[in-house]
Amino acid sequence: MAFVNGKLVRINGLVWVTSIYAGILIGIGFYRPRYRNHHPFVCLLFYGANTLFLPIISYLLSIDDSMDSDFRNFTRGSSYKVTRTRYYMDHDSMTILLAIWACLIQLVQTVGISNAATVAADDREAAGRRYTSLPVAPLLQATWAAYILFSKQSDNYFPSGLDPLILLLYAAFALMFARLVFKCFAFLMAQRSLALRLNPRLIVGYIEQLLLLQQEDTVTSSSSSQQQIDATATPPPLIVMGEESEQVLEQPHGFYLKRLMMMPRPSSIKNMNNHDNQLVTIDKIWQLQALEETSKDLCLSFALFKMLRCRFAGYTADETGYARAHEFIWQLLRTSHDDDRLLGVITNELSFLHDFYFSSLPIYYSKRQLPILSLLISLFTICCCLLFGIWVPYSYCYTNPDYYSNSSDNTTRCTWRQIEVSRYCYNATTPYYEGSRDEGLAGYLLYDLVPILALLALVMVAEAREVASCICSNWAKVALICRQLNINKQLLLYPTSRLQKSLVSAVLRFRCNLLNPLDDKMRQLPFHSSRKHIITALHHLLIGKTKNVKVPTAVKAAILNALRSNNGQLSNGAGFLLQRQGHGGRDFLWACTDDGKATSDVILTWHIATTILEASSSSSSSSSSSSSSPDNQIIVATHLSRYCAYLVKCWPELLPDDDKWSKRLYGAVSKDMRVLAMASCRGGSYEEMVELLIDKSEQEVVKNGARLGKQLALLEDEAAAWTLLAGVWSEMILYVAPSENLNAHSNAIARGGELITVVWALLMHLGIYTRPSADANSVLSIIDV
């Protein structure tokens, strides 16, 4: 029995370890699917699963196949002249359960592990270039696994014919191949789709046509002022969906719509959508008075996402810029009293971009029927798993009485053993079945049943997420709105069916946070207010680990208010200081406009000053004002300060300066702070600590930050100091956001988004692509002093 137990330990160990491994990957894919795109360790885990699962299946099945022959070789030579011994081994139940487990592990790999992003991106788009290929490897893996399993049936290792378990195995593999073939078909359709792969070329050409029509409107219009009012009051005709219904003509700068080219001249933008066409534009969506504002904003996000894709496809700002779109976003910024609304539009836009480049969901919308087919495959797979979960325990607990009964005394027993070894001892003149017989049992079927049931649950969890994506994702909602608009343009205004309206409204209102790839959070370098010394606090602030916090509403409001007040004229805080020169703002201008000072220098200087002020005010917090306004200013200043310092430390490529230089600067400042933290162990007052920073530091950034912090702390009104810091940091995040480093922002979107990426996309849609220089002359030229 030692030989049998050794085999079982290897089989059961691999089965359990592989099942737990699959469970971890399914959990990651369910809760944090974006980790598989950017987190190195998670990428290694998924790569290991795709590489090892098929060899493990082959190895386990080969062990099971060779068990009989190995057992015969092991027991050979046990016969003697007088007494002979014969061994028989029964492991049919384990063989069937092992085949079921192998099928399920391959199904788990297909639906939850090997389903990496299959992106129908244009050749110009670097962000999705590495995913633009057919999912051939999973298809070949599934084919090989099917061959191994069903070759065992031909070798009579487990029952054939119409046995329910065998039929379920066939059904599972059929659904597996249906999923893979469906994905290949969807990818091929998306490759030829104007709404997906070819969309940037269409959008660029469409914008060029809109600009030509706008020029004709300007020439023929009798009232240019009224035209400008109408342009800002109504949204521009940006494309949402329906490109497939249009005939296009390839031009040097993209695809033109033939319908617009054949319009009689002179033509107007107002008349371009009067024709009966299936093209859904944002101005049509805005006319649906019964449609909720959140649904309209979602369609606007989708239209802006298509324009943003053009930038990632390498088109310039001049080619993708549309003045009417910029004016409409400015109007939303100035008129909307909900600060979360506009930033929510941009966040949804970036979530569409994340889905397109880092998931397979968009390719299912290349044809109208594909989401329904994907939903049906998922539902059939869930039903197949439920049947497996019912029939497998039933067949081994309540059926097969011959196996579970003892014919000698007609008593019923249930061994629940994986292997049963029978030994017969008989004489040379006596048949073996008349001799003495004893049995040995090894293993438990629970070692097979528990992993099987766990894998069934994992498959259903993975498919449940697919079902939720087909029904509740933002892609599904936009498709539903556009589909209903084309079927019956009055459906959402005058619904003919109350049930139909209720279903549509329920789908549009449903929110599932698990399907949102982006977090409304911002990283922070943690500040430990309980530290005794200010330098120790600065040390932990600069070199400590980051933490993720939800973006406060006050921070969003401060950023948008700064954008409204400066009217798009960006500065690194100097503009706000000049506006507050009556309150001493000009005295702090030196910290922003010193000649030769880089952006990272300015960020770290103000960051150290903010930390010093926070540390100095913590001791007197009990006597401070309890009004909400100063509290909001503190929240804005501290959160943006820690976030900008986090960018310098972790992602300097998102900032204007050279990333290598910024990392070296941060390292030098951190080293300086570490030395000063060790020197401050003797203690001392707050003023002594600040003086130590000014006198002993080797870094000019640290000295400037300490001087600035001391200057802020000396202000008579602490609330005024926090108001000044909040204003500077609100302008700073706007100033550093414009960037041409699309690869850095693509990586930021892949790992769940960054606040600076949201601000960058917002500024781009407002027509702000670059920043002015940070010198004082530039600031004075844009600020009315």
Image (cartoon, grey):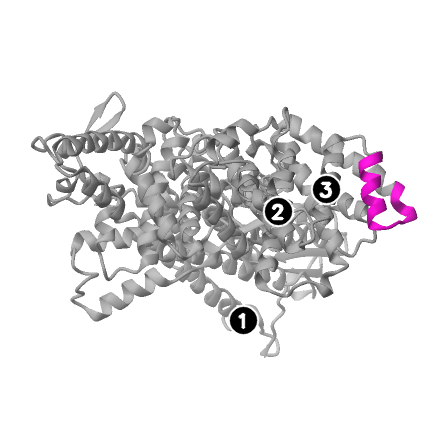
Please name the residue shown 53% across and 67% down the image.
396
Above/below status of 217 relative to 251: below
User: Percent x, y for residue 434?
Assistant: 65, 66
Is mark 3 in CB contact (under 8 Å) with mark 2?
Answer: no
- Give the camera-side residue of 112 and 325: 325
User: Percent x, y for residue 587?
Assistant: 64, 39
Q: Name the residue under label 2.
A: 725
- Give the camera-side residue of 567 and 404: 567
State how far apart marks 3 and 1 are (Cα).
62 Å
Q: Earlier in the sequence, mark 3 or mark 1?
A: 1
**Is 633 left or right of 463, judged from the image as shown?**
right
Q: Give the range drawn in magenta.
A: 679-695
Work out which quarter of the rendered image holds the N terminus and state it: bottom right
Q: Earlier in the sequence, mark 3 or mark 2?
A: 3
- Give the camera-side residue of 407 and 372: 372
From where the camera sits, is residue 598 visible?
A: yes
Of all residues shown, which one is farthest toward the left?
264
Q: Earlier in the sequence, mark 2 or mark 1?
A: 1
* Helix, strand or loop status at disc 1: helix
User: Percent x, y for residue 133?
Assistant: 41, 32
Mark 1 packing: few (<14 Cα in 10 Å), some, or many (20+)?
A: few
